[in-house]
Amino acid sequence: MKHDSFKTYLHWGLTAFGVVALSILFFFSLFKVGALVHFFQTLLGILMPFVYGLAMAYLLTPVFNWLHARFAPALQKHVKNPRRAARAAKFLSTTLSVLLALLLVAALLWMVLPQVISSIVGLVESNLLTNSIQNVTGWIEDTLQNNPQFEAAAQRVYAEAVAALTAWVKTDMLPQLTNLMSGLLGTLTFFKNVFIGIIIAIYVLNSKQLFAAQAKKLLYGCLSTRRANIVLDNARFTHRVFGGFINGKLLDSLIIGILCFVGMTALRMPYAMLISVVVGVTNIIPFFGPFIGAIPSGLLILLIDPLKALYFVLFILALQQFDGNILGPKILGDSTGLSSFWVMFAILLAGGLFGFVGMVVGVPLFAVLYSILSGLVCHSLRRRGMPEETQAYYELDHVDERTHDILYNEAPARPAAGSADRPE
């Protein structure tokens, strides 16, 4: 009896302590928002190598699984020790997966960087840029010679510009150099995080089955069986949505990039390799990606040949119609289950919050949240004995409070006795 009362007091004591602790944390978060944001930014910066590593491991998982499914049976036949065979299969699959990813990145850089350098050099050395500078300079000289009053004003503006430049060098140049150094340090930090992330990705790929088993063990140890099953089902659904969308989008963008290169080469357009890579990479972003890649590419071609720029715009429109109506549905199918409105909403919201990464993962993330919310709503409707189909609510007028029957506009029911009148 004393033991039961002690457990009761302990339960209420822990509950009260939790309420007080959460209240203190809530008020602290209200009055110390800046400190809280700074804390999470610092924590994210520290954990960024793990973020890169987990992202790379997730993207390489299909390649790892494909290689492991082929190495494991072959090694089990030739290696007597099963544990050694399993370790060797994991090692070979992980090594080849990472090497393939590094070779792909190196190939993209090898294709893009020479094109970028030659494009910049070509624009600098082109007659278009030189002639434009000469024309502007000649126009200014002729204007000043023919209008002495403008010449005096120009000299005054020139003197003010020199004074402003001198003041900027004395006062603002040092902060700009500091920002430049911060940018260089940020670049070095990025490459350091990527390097550490590659190592973390190798560990994750080698031990992903162990990590998954530990997560399931923790889940069923901390939650009830029913809730653990629900969490596990939602995690698998999230993996299916993210994996299907991201892997399908990567394959779709690769095909679009190759088709863009073939088409631009056949039409003899300039910067075919550079623009094809830009179009392929930006095509990963749903809805807005084709425009993000096509607009700067079209402007670049416009500087060289306006007629070919028009051909490029028409070609990109045809290519995107092929992607949106044939290739995309064939590869992706209905992987997200979202309408075009919610796709646009997810891209704008996630892109505004998290930039380029948000524009890529915003759609599958919103699809998961949308599905979970839809499941909760349908569960609540089932408990009330009401239909789950959205079509059943198109012409709904109201729901009977006692029977939960849906009453439609075509045959409105009279209000029940004692209930408040409803305005039509």
Image (cartoon, rainbow, N blue to C red):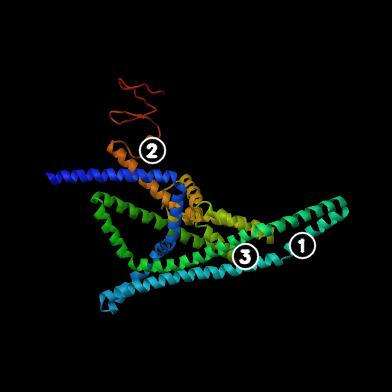
Say which residue appears at 27% left-offset and 43% top-offset: 16
- Taking the view exactly as shown, the residue that stands out farthest to the front is 170
Seen from the viewer's position, the closer of residues 345 and 142 is 142
Residue 215 drawn above or below residue 83: above
Circle 1 packing at 10 Å, graded few (<14), some (14-19), many (20+), is few
Q: In which quarter of the image is residue 81?
A: bottom left
How much space separates mark 1 and mark 3, taking CA atoms?
22 Å
In screen coordinates, is 324 left or right of 160? Answer: left
How far is disc 2 from disc 1 in space, using C-alphas? 65 Å
- Are the residues at dot 2 and dot 3 in contact (C-beta closer than 8 Å)? no
- Depth check, mark 1 against mark 3: the one in front is 1
Asked if the residue under mark 1 is in contact with the one under mark 2, i.e. CB atoms within 8 Å, the reply is no
Q: Which of marks 2 and 3 is in front?
A: 3
Quadrant for the C terminus, please: top left
Residue placed under numbered mark 2 in the picture: 391
Residue type indicated by callout 2: Gln
Say which residue label 1 marks.
131
Q: Is residue 147 visible?
A: no
CA gap, disc 2 and disc 3: 51 Å
Q: Which residue is drawn at 34% across and 41% down?
A: 377
Amino acid at dot 1: Asn
- Residue located farthest toward the top when viewing the structure as drawn: 418
Give the residue at x 31% y 76%.
75
In front of the other: 178 or 151 = 178
Q: Which of 327 and 297 is in front in this view?
A: 297
Q: The N terminus is located in which quarter?
A: top left
Q: Name the residue under label 3.
A: 271
Q: Position of residue 66 (x, y in %)?
A: 37, 68
